[in-house]
Every structure is written in C-alpha cells, then in structure tokens.
Amino acid sequence: MRILVTGGAGMIGRKLIARLAADANLRGQPIEHVTSFDIVEGEAPTDAPFGFEARAGDLRDSETVKRLVDDEPDAIFHLAAVVSGEAEKDFDKGYGINLEGTRHLLESVRQKGSHPRFVFASSIAVFGAPFPEAIGDEFFCTPLTSYGTQKAIGELLISDYSRREILNGISIRLPTICVRPGKPNAAASGFFSNIIREPLAGEEAVLPVSEDVRHWHASPRAAIGFLLHAATIDLDTVGARRALTMPGLSVTIGEQIAALREVAGEKVVARIRHEPDDFTQKIVAGWPRNFDASRAQSLGFSADSSFAEIIRNHIEDELGGEIA
Amino acid sequence: MRILVTGGAGMIGRKLIARLAADANLRGQPIEHVTSFDIVEGEAPTDAPFGFEARAGDLRDSETVKRLVDDEPDAIFHLAAVVSGEAEKDFDKGYGINLEGTRHLLESVRQKGSHPRFVFASSIAVFGAPFPEAIGDEFFCTPLTSYGTQKAIGELLISDYSRREILNGISIRLPTICVRPGKPNAAASGFFSNIIREPLAGEEAVLPVSEDVRHWHASPRAAIGFLLHAATIDLDTVGARRALTMPGLSVTIGEQIAALREVAGEKVVARIRHEPDDFTQKIVAGWPRNFDASRAQSLGFSADSSFAEIIRNHIEDELGGEIA
C-alpha cells in the first residue's frame, strides 16, 4: 500500500501521516510508503514503519504533479488548498491551485491508469446563505467565496472521474476544525478555536461575536477519522453521489464556553475577553450553523459526541494533559 | 450594443441571432454589431440592421477566444458546447471545450475588464437520478454525465465571476428543446421531437418508449425568450444565486400525441410507429421528468402554455403553416 498526501505539511496532513504511522496499515494492508507533498517539505513522522518522502512543490505545475503519481499510489488524500481568505484575495492563485492543481492531479491519475482511492477534503464553504435551519444532504451548493466555488468544482470532478472509473473518489466536507492547534491565525473563523486554546494555555483570547452564534465543529481527531473512513469505506455503498457532508457538532459560543467551564473551570473561562466586532459578526452571520448529515452518519462516519470531549481531546493531544 | 454569440451556427444560436435581427435592439439599446462564433462559420441573418461577423474556431484555443472579446461586447451569449453524447464518448474534447473553453472565455473577459452581461446556456443535465417528483430550485446538482458535470461547473464559475464583479452573469438551465427542427439525430432524446416533426412532414417516426414516459420540454421560441430575458433582467433581483432552472412543460408522450392529434389529426398521428426499445427506455428512466421552476417564473421567465401551442408554433415557424 503506497499513499500520497497532498497538503502533507499542513495541520491535518501532519496528523493524518502521524496516524498512518501509528496504524501501520490501511484497509487491512501494510503501508509500504507515504509521500507527503506541500509547498514546503513536511517533517517525517516519528517511528514510521514505512518509507517516507517529503516533496515540496507547486500544484500549478503539471509536470511536478505528474511525478507525484509515478509510483502509482493506491490511495491519495488530496488535502492541499489555498485557504478561503487567500483564495479570495488572490484570484489567480486560488483558481490556479484549488482548481487547476486539482485537475492536474486528476489528469495525472487518468494518464497513469491506476485507479487509486481518492479522498478529497472538501468544505462546508460549498454552501452559501440563506440556509435552512439544518442543511440537508440534498441542499444545493451556492458558494459565496471563490474557495467554496473551487471546492464545489472539485467535488463535481471527482464524482465524474469516479463514475468514469478513472479513480475511486469520495469528497468529504469537513466542518470547521476546532480546537485548531497552533498560533492564533488571521482567519475570520479563528476565534472559535482561539477562545478555547488560548485560555487553556494561560493566554487571553478575544471573542468578537455574541454567545448565541451557532457553528458546526469537528475536532482534528474526528477529521482524521473521517479521512481514514473515506479511504476504507466500500464505495459501492456510497453510490454515484460522492460528495458527503461530514457529521459534526452544532454548538453555540455559549455552549463552547460552558463546556470549557465544565472541563477547565472558571479561572480558564475568565481569560476570554468579550469584544463584539460588527465586521466579524456580519461575516459569521453568512456561515452555516447546523447540518443534517444523515447520509454520512448512515455510512459510518462519526463525529465527536460533545464539545467537552473535543476540549478533553485537545488537552490530551496538544497539551500533554496539562491546563495552564 | 455589441453582442457575441458562441455556438452561433447551432440551432438555438441561429434562431437567437435571427431574433436579434428582428428586434434590432436589446435592453432598449440599438444593436450595432453581432459576432457569431462556432466551429463552422454561421450564416448572416437576413435583413440584419447591424454589422455581422461570423468567425469559426475552437474554444480550446485561448488566443482565438481572447480575440472574441477584443471589441468588448456588452452582452455575451455562451451557447457553444460539445453535446451530451459526444462529451461522454470523447472525454478530452468534452472537458476541453465545455470546461476549458468556458474558462478561456471567462478569463478573456476578466483580462479585458469590460463587465459584460454573460448569459450561459446550462442544462437540466446538471441533475442526476434519483429525483423528487418535481425538482425544486434548491435541489442539488449530481450530474450523471460528463456534459452535466461540465455545465454544473460552468454555473459555479459564472456565479463566482459575477460575485467578484468580473461580469454580470446568469446561467439558465434549458429544458429539452421540442420540437427541434431539422433532421432526426442520434441523440437518445431525439424521439421526443421526431414523433412530432416527422409525422407533420409526412414521414414515419419511431417511438422507442412507452406513452407514460414524462419529460420536460420547451419550444425553440420559448428558449429564445429565456435567453433574451436573461440578457435584460435586472440581476439585482436575481441576487447571488445565478443558476436558474427554466420553466417548461412536463408532459407524457401520450399527452404529446394527444396534442398532435388535436392540432393535426389522426392521419398524422398514424405515422408514429411504436417500437419499444429497452435500451432507450432504460436511459430515459434516469432523466428528470418534472420541475418546480418557481424562482425563474417569479423572475419573469415564461414557458409555452401547452404542448398544442408548441406544435402550432413549430408549424408556423418551420413549416410555413403547412402540414403534410
């Protein structure tokens, strides 16, 4: 079993590769080799029981992409993307990497003729307001960002390439990942993680929206679980409709804070500073709040059971069990 | 007002250009020039009150496409496409023309910076079975052909390019065009038109499916009406969701035949030969039967009022009022 992970140096990519190293096999077969591809060289996982190669390059370069499938990987996790904010700011880069890059990869697979399992990390950004209270599995995609547009196009391509038996593809729409480890970033959605991660680390965090804001979350651990399940599921049970909204937790900011209080106490919660900001509040109002992800659930994808569990997993996975 | 029509030599393109010649203006402004682009040179409309140029070329060639917008057309009707059957048989040609060609055109417009009205002829092929009894405006796109995939991608691109104010775009999903003039063709959907057109012209026609098959139709006249309305409608009233299912008539084959009897009598109807064919019956079973096109209707798009009217229009427009 040979595996290619694009975006292998990113947060999800690194966690996926670490998990592959821990599992040592996929679909019951031992993993022989993992290639990580990203704009920078990813680090090798510790104690990997397989050969590992980190390549750095640009998905816009079709020759680079072609070489990625030279060794005919059995499974490809296509996680690489220019993120939402950047795709919105840099039109050419967003379309170049998210659309053209994905096409290069799909075409390289087609020319190789090797029919790999192909797992595409899509996003709930394929949806655009106004929404029903809970977005169902048959709701249409009307993205309001170029990033969401590019993800929706990727889903369509992967369904068609699968139907034509060029690859065995599946697209999974990840919820917002929370608690996102690392430094606070500039993403408008950053505060969902910041208000948990920073207080747990003894730092202050700013909450720019009101506590009744509701959003759709999954932990990094759950996200890795989705990717692995997507790589192993019998695709005959999925049928022709290969883009699935992943299950998640629909919680309000108030519920996030209550869970933080339950897990870490009032001292930690007190580090959240409420500074409502109309600009952010307005952006967030256009985001999906809740989904009915019945289809994915019936296909065995499973999410975190509570936000307290998400916080406990974060403390265990990222903080070595310690709260500041 | 300068206008570009891609697919200008096709059935709909020619009818659109003839109508533009008859109207002499669009959005209350006189039409100065029309450029027709197709793989073959389109014929000039008779008595055109505007300059007319027919160009022949390939949408896959970005330089050719770039030159199409050199004169900064105020309105672009993008009708050109490799049709369903061909896009399915020739993977590269379908993606090359329907996806890459459309991207070339959109990018040329972006580089020009001229913000034209952009009307994209999409198709009900963006939908794939299983369907609800009537497909609503918020039903998701899960095409089961490469053609439908390419049209769905075109819709997404045009919505995003519109949102980013590169152009003023709208995608209209045309019903099956019936009665399609000209010779019977090899398209699996050809019989819907053949069983009306051929008997009216004194020829036999084969009906390969049972009379209870239901489908979604619009006349060529209605289709031209949709295109012109799309070119003139205030897009602020349409909002961000720029892909619209056009209204149509949902009728069974039995109702088509009854309308033919009403308009042309039993002698004409007797020219239909019933030869059920499992292969065609199976293909047709996967096609949409009915839509709830409320949104387009509320935006002023209007379809034929009855199948008898469709037949009468065909006799008037194509047969000079004469039935064989």
Image (cartoon, coloured by chain):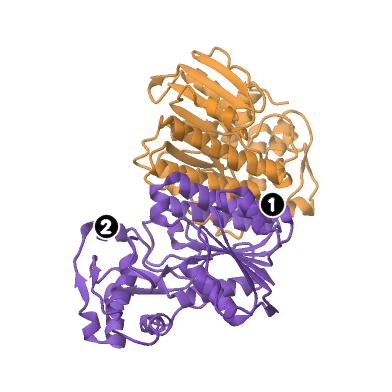
Chain colours: A orange, B purple
Query: What's the chain of the residue with tag 1?
Result: A
- Mark 2 and mark 1 residues within 8 Å of each other at the beta carbon: no
Residue B289 in percent (x, y) is at 36, 67
Q: CA distance from mark 2 to mark 1?
A: 46 Å
Residue A76 in percent (x, y) is at 49, 30
Which mark, residue B282?
2
* Viewer-closest of B88 and B291: B88
**Residue B157 appears in the figure:** yes
Q: What secondary structure is marked by label 2?
A: helix
Which part of the image, by quadrant, shows the C terminus of chain B? Answer: bottom left
Residue A142 in percent (x, y) is at 57, 56
Three-letter code for the amino acid on which mark 2 is drawn: Lys
- The residue lying at 32 percent from left, 76 percent from top is B197
Query: Crowding at label 2, few (<14), some or many (≥20) Cα neighbours within 10 Å?
Result: few
Which mark, residue A284?
1
Number of disc labels? 2
Query: What's the chain of the residue with tag 2?
Result: B
Three-letter code for the amino acid on which mark 1 is drawn: Val
Q: Left or right of B117: which side holds B9?
A: left
Q: Left or right of A221: which side holds A209?
A: right
Discs 2 and 1 share one subunit = no
Q: What secondary structure is marked by label 1?
A: helix
Which part of the image, by quadrant, shows the N terminus of chain B? Answer: bottom right
Q: Nearer the viewer, mark 2 or mark 1?
A: 2
* Viewer-closest of B55 and B103: B55
**Residue A144 appears in the figure:** no
